[in-house]
Amino acid sequence: MKTHAQAVVIGGGLIGCSILYHLAKLGWTDVVLLERDELTSGSTWHAAAGIHGLHDNNNVTRIQHYTMNLYKELEQETGQGCGVFQPGSLYLAQTEAREHQLRLQEAKARFYGLNFHELSREQAMELHPLAQFDDIRCIMYEPDGGNVDPSGVTHAYAAGARKMGATIERFCPVLGTDPQPDGSWIVRTEKGDIHTQWVVNAAGLWGREVAAMAGLELPLQPTEHQYFVTDAIDEVAALGRRLPSIADRDGEYYFRQEGNGLLIGAYEKDMRFWAEEGTPLDFAHDLFPDDLDRIMDNVMRATERVPVAATAGVKRVINGPMIWSPDANALWGPVPELRNYFVCGGIIPGFSQSGGLGLLAAQWMIEGEPQYDMFAWDLARFDDWADKAFTKARVQDQYTHRFAIHFPNEEREAGRPARMRPAYAMQKDMGAVFGLNSGWEHPLWFADQPGTVDTNSFTRQNWWEPVGREARMLREAVGVIDISNFANYIVKGAGAQDWLDRLMANRVPSETGKSCLTPLIGIRGGIAGDFTITKTDTDAYMMVGSGMAERYHQRFFDMVDRPEGTTLDRATNRIAGFNVAGPKARDMLQRLTNTDLSNDAFRFMRSATIEVAGVTCLAIRVSFTGDLGWELHCPEENQIRLYTALLEAARDFGGGPVGGRALGSLRIEKGYGSWGREYSPEYWPQEVGLERLVKLDKDFLNKEAYLGIKENAPREVLSVFEVDAVHDADASGGEPIFLPDGRPVGRVTSGAYGYSVGQSLAIGFADPALAGPGDEVDIFILGKPHRARRLAVPPFDPEGIRLRS
Ligand SMILES: Cc1cc2nc3c(=O)[nH]c(=O)nc-3n(C[C@H](O)[C@H](O)[C@H](O)COP(=O)(O)OP(=O)(O)OC[C@H]3O[C@@H](n4cnc5c(N)ncnc54)[C@H](O)[C@@H]3O)c2cc1C
């Protein structure tokens, strides 16, 4: 067996083989895959292996499309059959909300040049004469949908990888992974050790056990999952061609042809966890006993759709394990706390995503970053707050609602509360409706009645009016926004300024009491982050960034050596914060502090440590609302005291608490981007208007990459649109934008009603050659065209007079 390799992939399932293939394809041919049994010995061998292209997340759609096209190429490249059947898929809507979802997906498909379009009932009947569609209000057709042979695909990846020089060792369980001081690893097996640069954990059902070898706990939980295949059905055989599959998600089952019979599977409400205490090491090509009674309700609905299914006997039942992350997305990426350790686990639609997962994983290891922003998959979105209880509760919710629509703004209750600040109970009593934000319970809006919950749909919901009241209150008087969901870092030591300057694109302040905004540049020159950095004292800085990206950003922080004696303290858990903003913010705050807050004494982008109602706070004069305001950061234990005083004072000025949803609207009125939506490594600084903050007269992380793209004309530019919201719905992010003549021009990243400007708004990227300021476009909210105009400047205070007043 080899003793050295560039990467060792652990696990010869679908995903491990795809990663091996893509590593080799991108040039790393000195790579080894170790499989403890035969290839496909986990979830892979028994999968129903359906494939589809469309997903609510645009980048996942892109990589699913890549995957579907890859299988045929693989067959040609390797000669190994992948058993690709693409008779098409019919997507059915029984409800108005599902129709909205499908129409939106149709518009996105048009934008990305994918094949997905509406059919009449008659057309659907022609394609699937054995189904009935009487109760269906909208039918979409994806001609490329279908299924593959799970073993064929896995072996094709393996054959392709071997052809390029990769090695596969079967019956070779990995027994240990030991990190070396230089960042490399020793992978231990009974057949010997391999010294490798990268370890890839693609151990599927055993992802937790393999992670534990590196001292890592992954939020993953296996469940059982069942489908069955019927005996041959004469009516199916008589057709002499393959039937399209049926995705009747309102009916909560999936349905396709298998041989001359039918295959029906379901994510039942009465689900079962498996292997809660760990996946047995002797489990391989095994299944669980059948329990079709559990999925009988779903099956009944399926047989109402295709009545001949009820006439056939059951030929074979598959009840096998699959392993889930808390949000059913992949748990993917290099582990920030370890060097050169890549995880790719928790894959549910593996056959739709294997190619993209493999390609982007290989890009990440070889090129340093994937080509698309895949934060939705990045394991750094979870941290130790996603414990076992949270994971189980979320997995149960995900499994039992696998086919439910995930609405924009929807907050799932399962597993919560996970992480709470001291003010949680107080906010609850005040009527706060909470969202989950990097594990924190975070107030989204304040209802009149405590205990109120969000209603959900694609249209405006119960929160829309109250959020409007909060936004207007802030613009007219003052609002107190809990910003304890932001990430806080304290950098200290004689080398603090030097380190921050070598890390961040902007020059950090050298004078105590000054703040700056700065981008963090990614490996390809895009925006990996945006931070406010404040010099709080000699050799001391406070850095505020995106809460959800805290663990993600750690990877970048570790790329720049910290000078001896300089420390980076992730202080988020200890620091709470409020943003007090609005035209009366100064008068209100002045009541609570002896520090002079006048514009001359405390200017925009300045900071000071001040006493507010007896609580020592770092006050920074910035506000994501775009209004006059201060961020107040204080020790978490003083949060209630500060909050109580702020709210009392605000009340006297006609103000009060404001939640995260109003903040979302206010920042869009001002045209501010937000990390994860507008700011992402996919976009260059010149595309998001941040190039003025990149200082070329000094070094910073990934400066070379930035110089490489600096002179490129923007492909798309971040723009604000005013929208004619004719359907009682606002944009929410992801909607495609077309010119009135139908040419694709861009996509929305965030949307909201701008309550203080009285206009539905969207913010997103548009091709500047096609849509200039003032030009009309169509934004496909609910999948329907809504006329919109690109604005030359944001609608609220474009000159920044309020901020600086
Ligand atoms: C009933 C069922 C139906 C499904 N239907 C579909 C579908 O229609 N469409 C779809 O896209 N997906 C479907 N899936 C999901 C799909 O099967 C998974 O997404 C996919 O198989 C995951 O592959 P994997 O490589 O991540 O994991 P696995 O297949 O679990 O592979 C992991 C491999 O790692 C090996 N391994 C573990 N530990 C070690 C070690 N210490 N050393 C060496 N090797 C090790 C294992 O032996 C195994 O071969 C279905 C799953 C089930 C259970």
Image (spheres, rainbow, N blue to C red):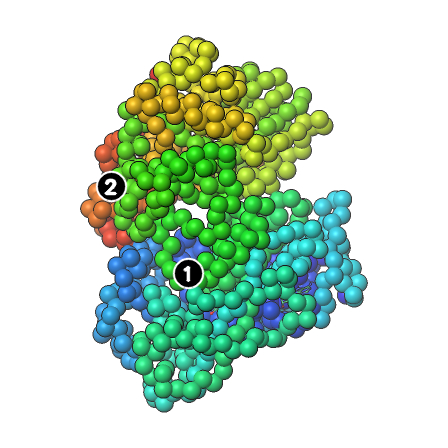
Instruction: Kindly tell me whether residue 788 is visible in this rendering.
Output: yes
Q: Residue at x 50, y 17 (%)?
A: 614
- What secondary structure is found at the residue carrying circle 1? loop
* Front-most of residues 186 and 365: 186
**Side of 122 where 45 appears, left or right:** right
Amino acid, disc 2: Val
- What secondary structure is found at the residue carrying circle 2? strand
Q: Residue at x 50, y 62 (%)?
A: 348
* Front-most of residues 146 and 396: 396
Ligand 1 shows up in the quarter that is bottom right
Assign the N terminus to one quadrant of the image.
bottom right
**Side of 26 where 69 appears, left or right:** left
Residue that badge 2 annotates: 723
Question: Which is closer to the viewer, label 2 or label 1?
Answer: 1
Residue that badge 1 annotates: 401
**Where in the figure is residue 292, as x and y percent of width and height?**
46, 77
**Where in the figure is residue 506, as x and y percent of width and height?**
52, 27
Badge 2 crowding class, 10 Å Cα cut-off, few under 14, some 14 to 19, many 20 or more, is many
Assign the C terminus to one quadrant of the image.
top left
Tell me which numbered mark, 2 or 1, is placed earlier along the sequence. 1
**Side of 218 where 267 appears, left or right:** left
* Front-most of residues 253 and 784: 253
Q: Residue at x 74, y 44 (%)?
A: 182
26 w.r.t. 708: above or below: below
Q: Residue at x 34, y 55 (%)?
A: 108
**Where in the figure is residue 469, as x and y percent of width and height?**
28, 33
